[in-house]
């Protein structure tokens, strides 16, 4: 890649302005190949040089993809008029100007949410044509009943008469009020409405996978991580429902059960 000014490189890939970058450089907060950069207008080679701002590497990738473990109480929007948004959880060194949440989780839902500035990928991911499966863990008000398995498999009909695509559901072995559910579509409040149609009630909900991209155990609620290209491609692969459920770590279910947050 041709040589590029350090401040231009950083300002195109983060939310920092050139003047902020200048002041961060003066404070020694910007490093180039491990040493504090002396000037913000120095020329770099983004493919070969490692640039860090406040300890976070600034990626040379054209688009940025973040996986956020969304906490309760944040809206999936870029507009602050809607309330406190998930964007406020992204550190400025990871944020780029065109970023938005690709998909929706309700304000009170937790779990895997993709934040990106790649509109084409978001479109591909959200298009019903691609049928990206999503797996959720839910805490129910009443015990799980095995009859849900067939009802959901046959496509449950919601209270307003809308029919859902076939979905998979299973209980979590150690708690009769926890269940996993896998959907191939994303109707408004769909998981909550599906359980309402079988006379149960979802008290808490967390998304644990988007396609083959599984929420990693190390990603605590409220934290985000940058994804590599191979992780992003995983979005379009189909995970095995039972393998994801049985390999799922307990810390999110503990949060759901104990309402700790
Ligand atoms: N279904 C719901 O009801 N809520 C979510 O946040 C996601 C899926």
Image (tube, rainbow, N blue to C red):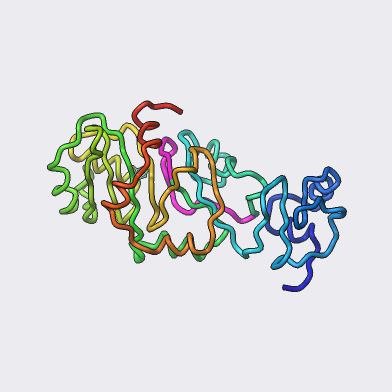
Does residue 155 belong to the magenta stretch?
no
Q: Quadrant of ligand 1?
A: top left
Q: Residue furthest front?
A: 34
> For residue 11, which quarter of the picture?
bottom right
Q: Which residues are magenta?
A: 97-111
Left-right relation of 243 to 106 = left
Left-right relation of 99 to 142 = right
Does residue 106 belong to the magenta stretch?
yes
> For residue 176, which quarter of the picture?
top left
* Residue 152 locus on image (x, y percent): 19, 49
Q: Is the residue 146 above or below the residue 185 in the image?
A: above
* Residue 245 locus on image (x, y percent): 30, 47
> On the rendered image, what quadrant is the N terminus found in?
bottom right
Magenta stretch prevailing secondary structure: loop
Residue in the foreground of this view, choosing between 102 and 1: 1
Q: Is the residue 14 above or below the residue 139 in the image?
A: below
Q: Residue at x 27, y 46 (%)?
A: 181
* Residue 79 locus on image (x, y percent): 57, 44
């Amino acid at each position: 890649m041709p040589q590029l000014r350090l401040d231009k490189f950083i300002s195109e890939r983060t939310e920092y302005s050139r003047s902020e970058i200048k002041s961060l450089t003066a404070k020694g907060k910007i490093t180039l190949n491990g040493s504090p950069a002396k000037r913000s207008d120095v020329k770099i080679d983004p493919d070969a040089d490692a640039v860090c701002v406040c300890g976070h590497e600034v990626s040379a990738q054209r688009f940025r993809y973040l996986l956020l473990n969304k906490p309760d109480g944040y809206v999936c929007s870029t507009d602050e008029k809607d309330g406190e948004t998930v964007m406020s959880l992204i550190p400025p060194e990871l944020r780029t100007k065109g970023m938005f949440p690709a998909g929706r989780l309700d304000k009170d839902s937790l779990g895997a949410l993709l934040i990106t500035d790649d509109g084409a990928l978001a479109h591909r991911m959200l298009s019903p044509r691609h049928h990206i499966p999503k797996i959720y863990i839910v805490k129910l008000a009443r015990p799980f009943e095995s009859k849900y398995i067939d009802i959901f498999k046959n496509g449950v009909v919601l209270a307003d008469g809308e029919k859902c695509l076939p979905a998979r559901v299973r209980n979590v072995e150690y708690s009769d009020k926890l269940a996993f559910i896998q959907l191939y579509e994303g109707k408004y409040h769909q998981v909550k409405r599906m359980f309402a149609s079988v006379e149960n009630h979802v008290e808490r909900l967390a998304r644990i996978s988007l396609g083959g991209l599984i929420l990693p155990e190390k990603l605590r609620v409220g934290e985000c991580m940058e994804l590599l290209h191979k992780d992003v491609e995983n979005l379009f692969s189909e995970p095995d429902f039972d393998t994801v459920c049985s390999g799922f770590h307990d810390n999110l279910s503990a949060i759901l059960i104990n309402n700790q947050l």
